[in-house]
Amino acid sequence: MVKQIAFSGILNNRQTFNPDFYNWNKVKVRYCDGSSFTGDVKRVNPTTNLHYRGARVWLAVMEDLLARGMSKAENAFLSGCSAGGLTSILHCDNFRALLPLGTRVKCLSDAGYFISLKDITGTEHIKAFFNDVVTTHGSAQNLPSSCTSRLTPSMCFFPQNMVQKIRTPLFILNAAYDSWQIKNILVPGVADPQGTWHDCKLDIQQCSSSQLQIMQGFRTQFLNALAGFGSSSSTGMFINSCYAHCQSEMQETWLSSNSPVLEKIPIAKAVGDWFYDRIAFQKIDCPYPCDSTCHNHIFEDNSEA
C-alpha cells in the first residue's frame, strides 16, 4: 500500500496522453479484499484479524463518492485492471443502479476476463481456486443472481458465465495471450514441476513451437469464452494478440507514439469513441505473432506479476 502512485494511461490528467478523460474527476479505489469486492463474512479471523468484507468496503467507498458529488455526475465510468477488471464486470450493473437515470454510465474491464480452463495436465486448477475464493469470502450473496440461479456460485466468478446478462454497456480490453492467465491458469506452477515452461512464461519469444501451439489453443478457448458477448452494439471489445496483462493504466499501451493498435486505432481512441457513442468498436486481432504493435511483457526471473 504505497502512499503515492502515478496516474497514467486512462487516469492521466494531460489531454495529449488521455484526450477523452483527462479532465474528469478520477478516483483510484484501493484493492485490499482479495475477492473483487464481493466478500461479506460476519466472523473476523481471531488469529489474523482479517475481515472478509469486500462488498461492504465497495459500498462504503461508493457512498462516500456519491456524497462528494458523484451523485451529480453526467458521465460515470467504472474501470479496473486484473482483479479490478473482474470487479468492473461483477459490479457493473450495481454501479449503474447507484447513479441517476440520466447519467451516462459504462464499464471497462481491462485484463479481467478470466476464463474457466483446464491446465496443461488436464486439471481444473482455476476452478478450484475460484471456489476457494468464493467460499472463504462468502461471495455467493453478492454475485449476480441471474448466474447463481443457474450455476454454482464459484462458476459465476468467471465472466463468460454471466457477462451476457449485464445490462450496462461494457467494454472488454484483454490480450488474447493474457500473461497472468497463461502463467496461473494454463500453466500454474503445480502443473509444471520440472519448470519446462519457465522461460516461456517469462518471455513469449522463448517459447518452443509446441508451447506456442498450446498457447494458440488457449487463445481459441479465450475467444470461445467471449462468444456471445459482442452480440449487442452497446458492448465494446479490443482483443489484441499480445503477451500482456493490463493495458489501460500504462501510458505506453494506452496512448503513445508506438502504443498497440487494432486497425490503426489505439486503445485510448477505441475506448473513448465507444464511451461517447462516436464509433462502435469490436475488434479481435489475428493470431500471434502477427501484431508488431504489441508491448509483449518480459518478466524478470522469480516475478510473480
Image: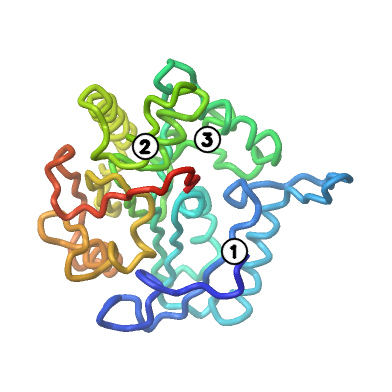
Front-most of residues 58 and 175: 175
- Residue at the right extreme, as displayed: 46
Q: Residues within 10 Å of mark 1 (few under 14, many from 20)?
A: few
- Residue at the top extreme, as displayed: 122
- Image quarter (top left, top right, bottom left or bottom right) of the N terminus: bottom right
Per the image, label 2 sits on a secondary structure element best described as helix
The residue identified by callout 2 is: 201
The residue identified by callout 1 is: 30
Q: Which mark is residue 50?
A: none
Q: Quadrant of residue 81?
A: bottom left
Which of discs 3 and 1 lies nearer the camera? The answer is 1
Which of discs 2 and 3 lies nearer the camera? The answer is 2
**Left or right: where does residue 59 sit relative to residue 289?**
right
Amino acid under disc 1: Arg
Q: Residues within 10 Å of mark 3 (few under 14, many from 20)?
A: many
The residue identified by callout 3 is: 156
